[in-house]
Image: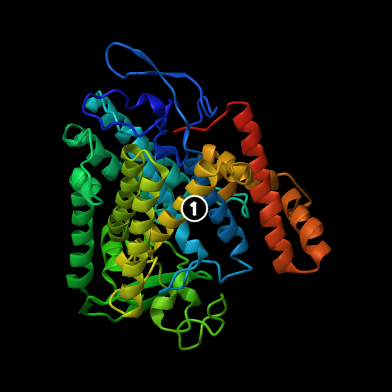
Amino acid sequence: MEDPKRLEEGSPHAPIVAGDQKPEATVVELRSVNENEKTTKEYEEPNVGENLILLKKKSKRVATLDAFRGLTIVLMILVDDAGSVYERIDHSPWNGCTLADFVMPFFLFIVGVAIALALKRVPNMKYAVRKIIIRTLKMLFWGILLQGGYSHAPSDLDYGVDMKKIRWCGILQRIALVYMIVALIETFTTKLRPTVIEPGHFSIFSAYRWQWLGGFIAFLIYMITTFTLYVPDWSFTVHHDHKSETYNVECGMRGHLGPACNAVGYVDRQVWGINHLYSQPVWIRLKACTLSSPESGPLRPNAPNWCRAPFEPEGLLSSISAILSGVIGIHYGHVLIHFKGHAERLKQWVSMGVGLLIIAILLHFTDAIPINKQLYSISYVCFTAGAAGIVFSAFYILIDVWGKRTPFLLFEWIGMNAMLVFVLGAQGILAGFVNGWYYESADNNLVNWIQDHVFIDVWNSERVGSLLYVIFAEITFWGVLSGILHKLGIYWKL
């Protein structure tokens, strides 16, 4: 697999790089590439063209990018594997925002930051576009393979998927779409970028107006479709115990933001087909569906029909809205490129982060547009992007300004090999492989034995034991392994 650093260096139209920043690797792989990780070290990078020109520069790596990406992977593992016993940190059943709801927008935010750094020079536009398309296709392939239903790891040892029910959407698929759109805009506007930013707090916005225009178009498409598309009545069939039962959902309305009749779900049912949507939506934990809300439990006897229906949380219309998360991230990357001083960068970052949080809170608490991850509402975009900006700024102060790098090394190591940890760890592929070696019964395997006897039995609590298992047997394990691979110079790249 190829090194993303080869993609885009050396355009005469590129903006002036702030200070001693080293170009970051493109985020297609959910991580920055770690070549010459030393803080200050000469390195050579080829200019992609017909003639190969070696350039030498001094660089200081921005460790915050790796640490932030690692934090996002850690959050994903935590909420996925501990959310079953601490469902209050799992995705919000509908309106609201929990710890799990920050994972996707944090990914998209750091995608945008790294695209700005990776594509600040594009000497060969055709080559850059080709690489963007190829990497997009790679992410789509891995996304469908991991979340389309083919892999049943780690709990089930069988594999394969009925193509009549394959799930086309997922985490990597959404990242692929956002990456492709934002990266192509950045590439095609190479010659329109300024070399020097004019004084003024808002000059950075006007300098990259084409990126913001792309985000505004995505905003318009999402808002117009959400509030004007007519959603008719619909039905679905549930198959169980060799019999089928069909349920009807009455709608016939526009602009509805509830679970049953929203335009986001309607678009996905029309585009993908209802059998290709996520079959276990989190709305089943709503009070309308179960007495155990906000935790899982048996359905109420009089639960609405839509409680049993599939819904795609990474669908088409909501992914168009998610483009805004990438656009906001790329803005943070542009600030990193053009502003040399720590104070100037932080002023831009923090002010925007706070502004986005205020907008989101106003929209949510006035009930104008509630914060909703399943719909990827505009208030949700603003709230999570604002939070990402604040966390990114805090990491930057601690790691790159104050030099407190050691406490965040585990995040940094995971961030350097995020694709590997995502596939083998977050998606349970390694655990599924280990589970394949069992004694007498499939449940009698090493993973279950460690979880039950080393953690749950010792603490005499399934909740505490499961949480400690996730922290030490998963997150710490992957952090140490990533650190070892980093020392050996081994990285999984797309």
Q: Is residue 404 above or below residue 259?
A: above
Q: Is residue 335 left or right of residue 74?
A: left
Q: Nearer the viewer, residue 425 or 234?
A: 425
User: Mark 1 is on which residue type?
Assistant: Ala
Q: Using the image, determine if residue 212 lies above or below residue 127.
A: below
Which residue is rendered at x = 80% and y = 56% of the image?
Answer: 454
- Residue 276 can be seen in this image: no
Which sits in the foreground, 281 or 389? 389
Give the quarter of the image for residue 494: top left
Residue sitting at x 29%, y 50%: 327
Q: Is residue 27 left or right of residue 202?
A: right
Determine whether 116 is above or below 491 in the image: below
Quick one: SS at disc 1?
helix
Question: Could you say where residue 434 lies in the image, as x and y percent from the top left?
Answer: 69, 44
Q: Which quadrant: the N terminus? A: top left
- For disc 1, the neighbor class at 10 Å (few under 14, some 14 to 19, many from 20) is some
Name the residue at 49% across, 53% down: 394
> Residue 57, position in %: x, y?
41, 20
Q: Which residue is mark 1?
A: 394
Q: State whether residue 187 is above or below residue 210.
A: above
- Expressed as whole percent of the image width and height from the top left, the position of residue 167 reads 41, 54
**Horizontal side of residue 60 vs 84, given as left or right:** left
Residue 39 in sight here = yes
Which is nearer the eye, 464 or 68?
68
- Determine which quarter of the picture holds residue 283: bottom left
